[in-house]
Image (spheres, coloured by chain):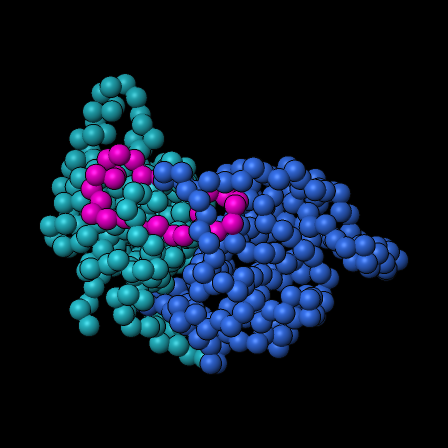
Chain colours: A cyan, B blue
């Protein structure tokens, strides 16, 4: 048992409520970290409390996330996309630690995102209807296959239920991915620049947007 | 190629917006029919228009649905549940046409639902977080594996997109599963009885609830 690890990179998810359901699946499939790039607040609605179990990490840019994954975690970066040469995910084309990069719900992977991928997997579709799967559905299928391939040990069951660990004590604000010291310094700098440019971007006021999200937080 | 078929039975889904995302996955994975038992109205939000592609069928009771699937479609009925003797879905324990019965989001399969199942599959989970997957995520993983096992032919692609058929002309009201003549007669009878008992149940006034749902209908 080589002890492979999986990661999920969330760069450009348009609907932040998808992050909650994603956290639920990431937890179920033994993902080591869920990596948010860009915005660090998210809506944990749909996570059923599992957002407290999965580890989140935040980076300001895709390239920082890439460097962390490649250099510190020795991950292959796998784009989930119907790209040229993409392998069917059920063929398990994995080799070791793998970080999965998900395309935006609408437009798929951007050119920048393509560039940092080492390989691609896709989920075969049949029939003639919709052209895409819900982003959490796609991620879950991929993470499930990685777990099967990596031979993760199954969670212990009691009758027909998996046994769940106690909810860990919450570190920091809910629905908010805590940053490293350097990333917070960087963020303050960016915010200051925005303010000097005479506008507040939507990340500008941390507390107000986070409070709003906390208001929405419900265990479905 | 034996031409196996898959079906999805939705009996007791508490959140009707889940039916929309389910329709999207059912379409993507070549499901022959989505079978609604009980309520026949649903919220197609999340289906991305695919609710027009997948065939819906409605039954008033689980036993009617069972008889249709067993007698007319020669299906095995497969409960998606961590039951005694359940097989891992990735081991593909399928033998022919299969109807998948999904448990309610909260409580899983009921005793009645258990009874009509020929066998069970479950999705292995790892880690120590949440005890369940989102119902659409679970269904999608199972339908994906059935498609792989059955050797469904893949949808034709154009570059990185699957080619989608034209949206079929809509038959009947949106977000509403049309019934057979007998089921409509039966429904009228039940409604009349409800009215005579001095109350309107939540299905009582078809048009008002359906209009409400139509109001909510948006392609996400």
Q: Nearer the viewer, residue B91 or B84?
A: B91
Which residue is at the far left? A71
- How many marks the image carries: the answer is 0
Q: Nearer the viewer, residue A166 or A92?
A: A92
Can residue A88 be seen by looking at this rendering?
yes
Q: Position of residue A59 (x, y in %)?
A: 21, 42
Tell me the chief SS of the magenta region: loop
Q: Residue at x 19, y 60 (%)?
A: A96
In this rendering, position of residue A191 left or right of residue B206? left
Q: Position of residue A158 (x, y in %)?
A: 42, 79
Read off the magenta span. Answer: A108-133
Q: Is residue A129 magenta?
A: yes
In this rendering, position of residue B31 left or right of residue A23? right
Q: Residue at x 69, y 53 (%)?
A: B40
Quadrant in which the N terminus of chain A appears: bottom left
Q: Residue at x 24, y 35 (%)?
A: A112
Can residue A169 be seen by looking at this rendering?
no
Q: Nearer the viewer, residue B16 or B51?
A: B51
Q: Residue at x 14, y 45 (%)?
A: A67
In this rendering, position of residue B80 left or right of residue A201? right
Q: Is residue A179 magenta?
A: no
Q: Position of residue A66 (x, y in %)?
A: 18, 44
Q: Nearer the viewer, residue B200 or A26?
A: A26
In this rendering, position of residue A33 left or right of residue A108? left
Which residue is at the far front? B1
């Amino acid at each position: 048992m080589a002890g492979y690890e999986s990661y999920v990179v969330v760069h450009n998810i348009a609907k932040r409520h998808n992050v909650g359901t994603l956290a639920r699946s990431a937890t179920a499939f033994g993902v080591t970290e869920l990596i948010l790039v860009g915005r660090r607040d998210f809506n944990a609605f749909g996570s059923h409390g599992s957002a407290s179990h999965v580890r989140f990490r935040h980076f300001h840019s895709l390239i920082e996330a890439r460097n962390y994954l490649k250099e510190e975690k020795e991950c292959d970066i796998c784009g989930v996309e119907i790209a040229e040469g993409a392998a069917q995910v059920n063929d398990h084309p994995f080799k070791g630690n793998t970080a999965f990069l998900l395309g935006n719900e609408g437009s798929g992977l951007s050119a920048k995102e393509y560039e940092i991928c080492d390989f691609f997997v896709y989920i075969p579709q049949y029939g003639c209807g919709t052209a895409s799967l819900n982003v959490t559905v796609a991620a879950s299928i991929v993470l499930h296959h990685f777990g099967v391939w990596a031979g993760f040990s199954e969670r212990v069951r009691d009758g027909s239920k998996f046994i769940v660990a106690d909810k860990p004590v919450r570190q920091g604000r809910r629905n908010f991915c805590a940053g490293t010291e350097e990333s917070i310094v960087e963020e303050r700098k960016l915010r200051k620049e925005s303010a000097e440019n005479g506008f507040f971007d939507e990340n500008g006021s941390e507390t107000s947007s986070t409070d709003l999200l906390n208001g929405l937080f419900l265990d479905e």
